[in-house]
Image (cartoon, coloured by chain):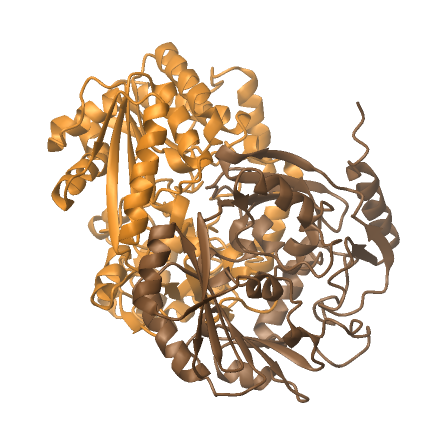
Chain colours: A orange, B brown
Amino acid sequence: MSTSTDKKLVIRCLQKILPTESVLHKEEDLRPYECDGLSAYQQVPMVVVLPETIKQIEDILSFCTNQTIPVVARGAGTGLSGGALPLENGILMSLARLSRIQNIDIDNRTARVQPGVRNLAISEAASSYGLYYAPDPSSQIACSIGGNVAENAGGVHCLKYGLTVHNILKLEVITMQGEHLTIGSDALDSPGYDLLALMTGSEGLLGVITEITVKLLPKPEAANVILAAFDDVATAGQAVSNIIADGILPAGLELMDNAALRAADDFVNAGYPRDAAAILLCEIDGTSAEVADRLEHAQNVLRTSGATEIRVAHDEQQRAKFWAGRKAAFPAVGRLSPDYYCMDGTIPRYQIANVLTRISELSNEYRLPIVNVFHAGDGNLHPLILYDANIDGELERTEELGGKILEICVEAGGTITGEHGVGMEKINQMCVQFNSMELQQFHAIKHAFDPDELLNPGKAIPTLHRCAEFGAMHVHHGQLPHPELERF
Amino acid sequence: MPDNNDKTEILCDQVLRACSSKTPLAIRSGNSKLFYGRDVQGEPLPLDEHNGILSYKASELVITARSGSRISDIESALDEHGQQLAFEPPCHSDQSTIGGAIACGLSGPARPFHGAARDFVLGAKIINGKGELMQFGGQVMKNVAGYDVSRLMVGAQGTLGVLLEISLKVLPKAEAETTLAFEIDAVEGHKMLRGWLIDGHPVTASCHYQGVLSVRLSSTENSISNAHRKMGGEVVANDLWQQLRHQSHPCFEQANLWRLSLPPAAVIHNEDDQLIEWGGALRWKVSNNDLFEQAQRLGGHATRYNINSSPAQENSSDEIFQPLQAGMLAIHKRIKHALDPNNILNPARLYKEL
């Protein structure tokens, strides 16, 4: 599919499946789809298609299977790992136009939605019934639920309310072979294998999701937040462990280091204690009585854990202000530096202090500042490496530093990705986390769904060949043998 | 010091040999859930001696144990730190192991409120059907690297891999627990219950049986007494939930018992011998005919559930589990093939074809 004649033929065939305006092929129309939320990786696809019906999706997939053309499905394109990066010789299928909320079932507390529905739109639609959809990735205003399922998206409230996999009941899926599968059901469990878990977080490699049934939860009666300041990051890390060991399960437990909290405070005037080495935001929700009891309990634990200052939001407005700083942390950090690179490693909580120390050593070694904002409650780190893409070689050094941070996470008993996915970005680190037998097992599972490897090929699971090359590069200790070669 | 309870090597060898000779293996641990599936004819692969807690830190909310560890041992370790297996796995005997609980994927009364066995699995070490030792997931709360093979093991009853080690998320126990009872029929009782759930009362279990709705509340003392004031009802003993969890309640002694997993609001009839849990989503019913069609019509599925009978014979046409629709069966076979190409791991335990 490399010549322009072939491309013209593909366009003509797709125009038989879809209205002409739903098949994009001109350079200027394709450009907006060249990357997802990770703009460091860019590739213009051969064609973009915008189906609006299940039948069109089915026909597109069948055409691609017959012509052996790879397909990448995409939701809102807010992903942070290059999972929706197009392929030069492939079709990018945007599911954004499948954006209907089909049904909200109050008695069963579920919502049946199309994949292009925005995460927040579900909670908004359920709100008048006192219900909401719990997973809340920071991109929830824009990100689509289909993408959330593909990435097993998390958010601030995971520790208590779980990830996407814990909050969905049923998927309608079409495979590259044209099979229609109903995975899961409206009941709480289903016969056979747990394909719902297998599909969730499979990064669009196994099937195209055409409908999702999510669970809705009752909105908690009350919620409040404690802001605790510490004069040392490690002490703050230890406080996180103490809270959890003492039997408190916060709805959110977030840590920001000094650089992050200052940036956020400059940006939205959150009223943070600017001299603190770190702050914790500890949110408690539940019934009013429960919240009152647990706020008291949590303050005691924070005090004995060495907090230098403790503030409890005295009203809803102050609570919103405390959170505004955390929610604005990424854009706030964006003002500190021309570019930043967001990592996503997860570690056991007791390793927080140790890993943060090693990250700070690496930051000095590479002379690249790192700001830490993270979901401390579940040990999910988001170190932000500050760099300037206009300085020659700085992106490469940043990526190398990022790779090292992920390897430290694996060494500490953690993982290279907590919620952003592997995509293109962390594909080399998959070779660190898994051995060749495990990777081959992943490929065998992929083949059970997509024997011709046409669905989002090259993402999420590296080939053994790629790992061999990465291993060889590793020997040189960061000095890449061929810096001129493309390295994903 | 050698760890005598680590049988990894022996087990790998046995699977490897079975793979090359294409000998079916019957995976066994506590032997307490034999009834839950079809009979497996094969060379026994015993896991009960592969046991022991490998790591547990209360501040991490994670426990890692070998599959042959008894649930009772795991729960006593957790209890010391005020923590629990929040999915309340049923133990049909004191021999029940964590490997068996995860392989069967059954969960107790708290399931709709805290989550199911699969929701708490963070990682697993397994041997696949080729005798390869592999590790998936991990010991952290969030992990999206690679396909979720560890959760795929839950409910697969060993047909996709021999479970060696399992990492589970655990939760703190609530400060207090109270059971409220209401004399009311099933239909009206569940209407009332749905209202309480939307109101956000700290409900962690429900049961309707013989004209009585029982509701468990778990939270702080203050929160429970507030909820009791609003909900009414009579405070009764908490022991019902243990009987339901371990399926020692008289309801489970009945012959021809069926487990129906349905959307919680699926139509309910007032029937005397029916026991309803999970806010309406789990119903236990006696029937001489199979209930597969009925369950499917209501949007769920049925399972033949006879604790006291021996497992259905290899060639029996009686399905234990709801038959899979053709497309789903095809993908199940391909997944089975991807993990166990010679079909040696608990063959036909779930379905004749797997």
Image-quadrant location for residue A60: bottom left
Residue A77 spot, x, y in % from top left: 30, 49
Q: Is residue A360 left or right of residue A455?
A: left
Nearer to us in this view, A354 or B220? B220
Q: Give above or below for B163 relative to A5.
A: above
Residue displayed at 49% across by 47% down: B173
Residue displayed at 11% across by 30% down: A269
Image-quadrant location for residue B328: bottom right
Nearer to us in this view, A455 or A415? A415
Q: How many numbered dots are placed on residues in this image?
A: 0
> Can residue B335 be seen in this snapshot?
yes
Q: Give above or below for B185 relative to A77.
A: below
Residue B5 spot, x, y in % from top left: 79, 36
Q: Give above or below for A386 relative to A51.
A: above
Q: Give above or below for A255 relative to B222.
A: above
Q: Is residue A368 left or right of residue B46?
A: left
Image quarter in which the C terminus of chain A is found: top left
Nearer to us in this view, A382 or A174? A382
> Can residue A34 be seen in this snapshot?
no
Residue A372 spot, x, y in % from top left: 31, 26
Residue displayed at 77% across by 38% down: B8
Nearer to us in this view, A16 or A467? A467
Q: Is residue B268 left or right of residue A79?
A: right
